[in-house]
Amino acid sequence: DAKTTQPPSMDCAEGRAANLPCNHSTISGNEYVYWYRQIHSQGPQYIIHGLKNNETNEMASLIITEDRKSSTLILPHATLRDTAVYYCIVTLGSARQLTFGSGTQLTVLP
Amino acid sequence: DTGVSQNPRHKITKRGQNVTFRCDPISEHNRLYWYRQTLGQGPEFLTYFQNEAQLEKSRLLSDRFSAERPKGSFSTLEIQRTEQGDSAMYLCASSASDTQYFGPGTRLTVL
């Protein structure tokens, strides 16, 4: 699975959009980009995933660049409860282990 | 809520004792995964089941660790002769296709 690079930490004001970047320059054509988050002392929570096209669900939007070498997770209106470590993972998907990096600690400030 | 459940949520044991954790996956999910997470690190893969078959094991899964999924439903993870280095959060996940859904984890403390 391709390796990902994320900033170690980011701050965001409550109510503003949080944009979390991820670099995955060695991604292969059939690898998906997954995002999970982990609130302190809880299990990771699935957020969203995509292959080539941008994706949106009730939690977030995922923007993947045309060359697929990077992506951005967007939380449109961050709340205090969005404070968590966000992990960007690139994987072949089905039946594969997930390889977590260090993630980005997002802190939403009041 | 019919998400992944894990029991116990917390376990404190003395070095050298055996411990067993249980994971109940989401109903109808045929794939089940175990991960371990130490403080400040992301989760690390331990092992994977498809139905009752254990198909993949990490090098992290030493001889003291054994996992089972006897009927393709719930799974157990046993650690024999625990060591202080086994202190961690043990996470279980399940999936029916591509997306893994995680349970709340079992936090193990070895004294």
Image: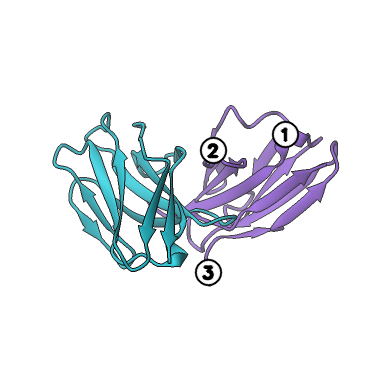
Disc 3 on helix, strand or loop?
Answer: loop
Q: Is residue B94 left or right of residue B63?
A: left
Q: Is residue B81 left or right of residue B69?
A: right
Kind of residue at badge 1: Gly
Determine the residue positioned at 35% across, 35% down: A4
Q: Is residue B30 visible?
A: no
Q: Is residue B80 left or right of residue A91?
A: right
Instruction: Judge the density around disc 2: few (<14), some (14-19), many (≥20) Cα neighbours within 10 Å.
Output: many
Kind of residue at badge 3: Thr
Q: Quadrant of the C terminus of chain A?
A: bottom left
User: Residue at label 1?
Assistant: B85
User: Residue at label 3?
Assistant: B2
The percent coordinates of residue A91 (x first, y second) are 35, 39
Residue B96 is drawn in which quadrant? bottom left
User: Residue at label 2?
Assistant: B44
Disc 2 on helix, strand or loop?
Answer: strand
Badge 1 or badge 3: first in the primary sequence: 3
| Chain letter for mark 3 | B
Task: From the rendered image, report the letter of the chain displayed in cyan.
Answer: A
